[in-house]
Image: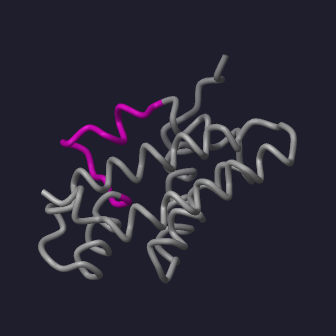
C-alpha cells in the first residue's frame, strides 16, 4: 500500500522529474531520462503516479506535456497541439517501461526492456506523422 504524501512532497517529486526532462537536449534523451528517473527513484515514481488523475486532468497545469509537445512541434513542424496523440503514445510507452524498471529484477531482463524501449522510441520518432492530428 502507498503511504499518503503531502501536496508539497508531491510537488517536489514532480519538480525533480521535470528538471530531468527539461534539461534534455533531444526528445530521445528526454524519454530515456524519464525511464531512468523511475529506475533510480522507484518509491518517488510510485508516489507520483498514485495521484495520476491530477497530472492528466486538462484543467490542471501540465508542464511536462506542454514542454514535450513544443519540442515535437519544433522538430517536426506544425503546432504543439498537433502532437497530442503522439504525447500520449510516448507517455504510455515510457510509463509502461518505467513501471517495469522501477521494480527490482534480473538485470538481463531489465537490459532487454531498456534496449527495446530505446529501439521502439526511435522507430516512433521516425514515424511521428502516424500520430500527428
Q: Looking at the picture, tell me which residue is in the foreground, 79 or 9.
A: 79
Q: Reply yes or no: does residue 81 show up in magenta.
A: no
80 relative to 88, above or below: below
Total marks shown come to 0
**Residue at point 12%, 57% (across, down):** 133
Q: How is the image coloured?
A: one colour
Q: Residue furthest top?
A: 1
Q: Nearer the viewer, residue 91 or 23?
A: 91
Residue 118 horizontal side relative to residue 126, left or right: right
Would you identify the image quadrant in which residue 58 lies?
A: top left
Viewed as shown, does residue 27 lie left or right of 12? left
Where's the N terminus, which quadrant?
top right
**Measured along the vertical axis of the image, is residue 30 above or below residue 59?**
below
Give x and y (percent) for residue 90: 40, 53
Q: Is residue 57 magenta?
A: yes
Q: Is residue 78 above or below residue 100?
A: below
Q: Residue at x 36, y 42 (%)?
A: 55
Tell which of 3 and 120 is nearer to you. 120
List x then y, in percent, for residue 21. Answer: 50, 67
Judging depth in this view, the residue of 31 and 120 nearest the camera is: 120
Residue at (52, 29) in percent of width and height: 50
Residue at 70% of width from left, 38% of height from top?
A: 43
The image shows residue 101 at horizontal and vertical percentages of 70, 44
The image position of residue 60, as x and y in percent, is: 25, 45
User: In the image, which residues are magenta?
Assistant: 51-64
Amino acid at each position: 500500500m502507498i503511504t499518503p504524501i503531502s501536496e508539497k512532497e508531491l510537488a517536489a517529486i514532480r519538480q525533480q522529474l521535470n528538471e530531468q526532462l527539461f534539461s534534455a537536449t533531444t526528445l530521445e534523451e528526454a524519454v530515456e531520462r524519464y525511464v531512468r528517473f523511475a529506475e533510480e527513484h522507484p518509491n518517488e515514481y510510485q508516489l507520483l503516479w498514485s495521484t495520476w488523475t491530477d497530472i492528466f486532468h486538462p484543467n490542471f497545469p501540465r508542464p511536462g506535456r506542454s514542454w514535450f509537445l513544443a519540442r515535437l512541434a519544433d522538430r517536426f513542424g506544425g503546432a504543439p497541439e498537433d502532437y497530442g496523440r503522439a504525447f500520449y503514445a510516448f507517455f504510455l510507452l515510457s510509463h509502461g517501461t518505467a513501471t517495469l524498471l522501477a521494480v527490482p529484477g534480473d538485470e538481463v531482463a531489465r537490459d532487454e526492456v531498456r534496449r527495446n524501449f530505446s529501439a521502439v522510441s526511435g522507430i516512433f520518432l521516425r514515424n511521428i506523422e502516424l500520430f500527428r492530428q
